[in-house]
Image: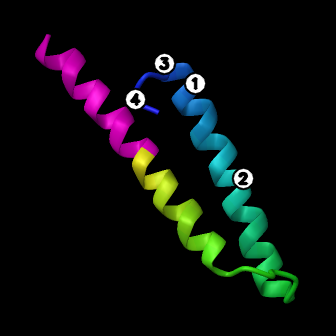
């Protein structure tokens, strides 16, 4: 993920947010088969946000 560009990271973040929304919706309606998937998606969102923030800080320091 660290090799991705800013645009790719933002696109990945949006995709993951949509996936999390769908998982939450499935969870509420009782259709979610694997509730651990929600935790994985949340952690992946946090990873992407961390990488985006690191790149922002690198730009400021440069």
* Marks 3 and 2 in Cβ contact (< 8 Å): no
Residue in the picture at 47% in, 33% down: 1
Residue numbers of the magenta segment = 48-62
Vertical position of residue 40 compared to residue 36: above or below: above
Q: Nearer the viewer, mark 4 or mark 2?
A: 4
Residue at numbered disc 2: 18
Residue at numbered disc 3: 5
Is 17 positioned to the left or the right of 43 in the image?
right
The numbered mark at residue 2 is: 4
Is 47 positioned to the left or the right of 19 in the image?
left
- Between the C-alphas of marks 4 and 2, the distance is 21 Å
* Marks 4 and 1 in Cβ contact (< 8 Å): no
- Between the C-alphas of marks 3 and 1, the distance is 5 Å
Q: Could you tell me which secondary element the residue under label 4 belongs to?
A: loop
Residue in the picture at 61% in, 37% down: 12
The numbered mark at residue 8 is: 1
The mark nearer the N terminus, 3 or 2, is 3
Report the magenta stretch's main SS. Answer: helix
Q: Could you tell me which secondary element the residue under label 3 belongs to?
A: loop
| Res. 53 image quadrant | top left
Q: Nearer the viewer, mark 4 or mark 3?
A: 4
Q: Per the image, is 58 magenta?
A: yes
The mark nearer the N terminus, 4 or 2, is 4
Query: How many other residues sit within 10 Å of disc 1, few (<14), some (14-19) or many (≥20)?
Result: few
* Marks 3 and 1 in Cβ contact (< 8 Å): yes
Q: Could you tell me which secondary element the residue under label 2 belongs to?
A: helix
Tell me how many marks there are: 4
Q: Where is residue 33 in the image (x, y as percent from the top left)?
A: 80, 82
Vertical position of residue 46 compared to residue 3: above or below: below
The mark nearer the N terminus, 2 or 1, is 1
Is 46 positioned to the left or the right of 42 in the image?
left
């Amino acid at each position: 993920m660290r090799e991705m560009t800013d645009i790719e990271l933002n696109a990945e973040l949006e995709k993951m947010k949509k996936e999390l929304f769908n998982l939450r919706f499935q969870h509420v309606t009782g259709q979610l088969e694997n509730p651990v998937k929600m935790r994985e998606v949340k952690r992946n969102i946090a990873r992407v946000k961390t990488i985006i923030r690191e790149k922002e800080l690198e730009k400021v320091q440069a």
